[in-house]
Each structure stands twice: as structure tokens, then as C-alpha cells.
Image (cartoon, grey):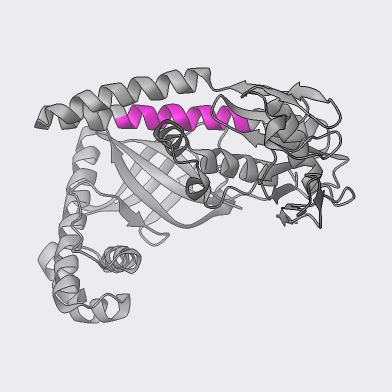
Amino acid sequence: MLLTVKTKLHPTKDQHLKLLRTMERFNEACNYVSEFAWRNKVFDKVTIQKNLYYDIRSQFGLSAQMTVRLVGKVSESYLADRSCYHEFKPHGAIIYDQRILTIKTLDACSILTLEGREKISMSFGRSQPLDLKRVRGQADLVLIKNQFYLLIVVDVPEEPQIQPKEIIGVDLGIVNIATTSTGEIFSGKKCTESREKYTRIKGIFQSVGTWNAKKHLKKISKKERRFKNDTNHCISKQIVAEAKDTQSGIALEDLTGIRDRVPGYKALTSAIGKWAFYEIAMYIRYKAHMVGIPVYLVDPQYTSQQCSHCGYTSKENRKTQSDFFCIDCGHAENADINAAKNIASRADVNQPIALRPEPKRSGRWKGKPTTLVVGS
């Protein structure tokens, strides 16, 4: 599995200036290439390189491999979107590879600048899986708050996949960000308060519209993004740890197209759109695969209306956001836990359930489950 490890560089003042000049020159050359590509409607890497390689080297003083990397950066950006001209910011990322970046040890690297190679010390969180033998492909040099970081791609080995004894279903929501079929509830109260707070503050800055307001708006947005990221990491880590301790698989709802399935009123649409459900599911999946835990994606339709005890499905079963009471068998339970149990059941091939309503008044289900095993 390929993961990105964020390492912090510790250059001297002179080295910092060299890296900064190199970054600005690199992105200046990117704009030169971008202007040629847009004007001539030529976006493939080979053609651009044939036309501009020597011009870039002589005009900007970049090395051969750095020239190749910047042409690739511009070409890839246009492969993603050709609807408009692409302008590169002065402090955009530099793409390095093994020819112009060498990681000597876990605390130092040799990196190419306009003035030649520089040996720069670096550090990273010890919980991150940085193994020199497993560093793969390119690394991005980025500047964040006047601090240089290397984003290094590492090939992390996955543990052999276990044969799960049981399945833990995970229901994702707004009031409770995640609820497991084992009864673990991760409340979304703080997240809701945070979302409302940031929405209110950003609305004020947007109404002002000044340069300073836009600067603060960008700062607030980044702070909100970090909060979401940290929350999703913590929750996914706990869920995977529980699955590992109990030798269980994990079942998730297939959230493809969730925004298209949201009911049409504004408040819920805003809440769903502003919380990264796909992100937390992705974090659970990659953390699980690293420790050999199988992950199943199931159809999320009607999981909140179906009784986990008898299978009866009806809107009337969901009394409130938190209360579930089956009008057929009388089973009562927390609504999110009930939904998580349904998700777990749908991932269990030995307990087939139907994902399409039977056209009868009984409201029960028939058919075969739709289950996708990820990483098996």
C-alpha cells in the first residue's frame, strides 16, 4: 500500500533561501510552459518537452531532470482540466524524484537547488511508516507557513488478511459521526458545534469581501479542515483497533453518490456536504488493510428503516433520530446501533438479506445481498 509521509525539513537560513529561490524559479518555468501549452493547445508531455526543453534550461537555469519534472507537472494539470489556462503560484510544490533527491538517512536528505545539492536535516513523527528501503517514486517539496516539508511516498507492506470471526458494522451520520454494531457511539456534537461556528464566521468574512477578510477566511477554512481531518483519523483508528482486537471484519455503507441521495431540505444538505463521510470511510479502509482486516462495502438503502431483529422494513419503525421501534415484532433499540447491525448483516454472506423492497403490503424484503469485499 502506498502512503504519503510528511517530513519536516530543518534548513539553515542560507539553505532556506536556496530552496525558496528554486521553488519560485520552478513555478515561474511552469507558467512559461503552461502559457505555451494553452496557446498552442498542446498538452501531452512528450510534445511539450520536444518544443521547450532547451528553452527552459537556458532561460531558467534548471537542471535536466527538474525540467522534465516541471513539464510533467504542467501536462498532468491539463490532463485533469483543459477548460481554462492554468497559472502556478510562486510557492507551489516542486516535484522531486530519486535523481534530484536522495534520502541518506532517516534524519537527512540531499536535495537539488539552483546552486547545487544541499544536505538538509529532517524529522517526522515516529508513528509514521518511513522506511528507506520502501521509499517509492516522487516526493513533493511544499512550503507551509514559511516551513518546508517533503511529502514522501512510501510502500507500506500490508499484513496477511485475516479470516474474520464476525463483522462489525459501521453506520455514519450527523448526530453521531460513527456508530458500530457492537454499541460504540462516536458523538458528533462537537463537530456540529464546530461546523456551525465556522459557517457563521466564514459568512461574516464573505460579506465583508476585503483582502484582509479573504485572508482570514482562508485561514479559518484551513483550521476547519485540520479539525475534520484529526477527528476522522481518531475515530477510524479506534474502530480499526476494536476490529483487530476481536479479529473481526468491518462493514461500511457504500457512500458513492451520497450527495445525490440527500433529502432536499437545506440544513441537512449543508451538514452532509460539509462533513467528510467519504474521508472517514477511506481512513477506516486503509488503516484496516494495513493490519489485515477485511473491509466490506454494502448497499446503504433502508438500513435505518429495517429491523435488525426480524427484518421488517418501514418508515414507521424510525420514531425519532435516536429511537427505533419495530412495529412488527416490537424490537426497540438505538436507531444508529440498529442501522449498524443491518450493515454488518448485509456483509455476512451466510445471512442473506434483500436490498430491494418486495411489492407486497408486508413491507418485508427478498433477494440477494450486494456485497463488495475490498482488499480480499
Q: Position of residue 196 (x, y in %)?
A: 38, 22
- Considering only vertical position in the picture, is 368 above or below 59? above
Locate residue 346 relative to residue 120 in the image: left or right.
right
Q: Nearer the viewer, residue 289 or 90?
A: 289
Residue 291 visible, this angle: yes
Q: Is residue 226 magenta?
A: yes
372 vs 305, nearest the viewer: 305
The percent coordinates of residue 367 (x first, y second) are 81, 57
Q: Is residue 290 visible?
A: no
Asked whether 371 or 86 is in front, the reply is 371
Q: Residue at x 54, y 32 (%)?
A: 232
- Say if 239 sits above or below 60 in the image: above
**Magenta part of the chain:** 221-236
Q: Nearer the viewer, residue 165 or 52?
A: 165
Residue 311 image-quadrant placement: top right
The main secondary structure of the magenta stretch is: helix
What is the quadrant of residue 267 in the picture?
top left
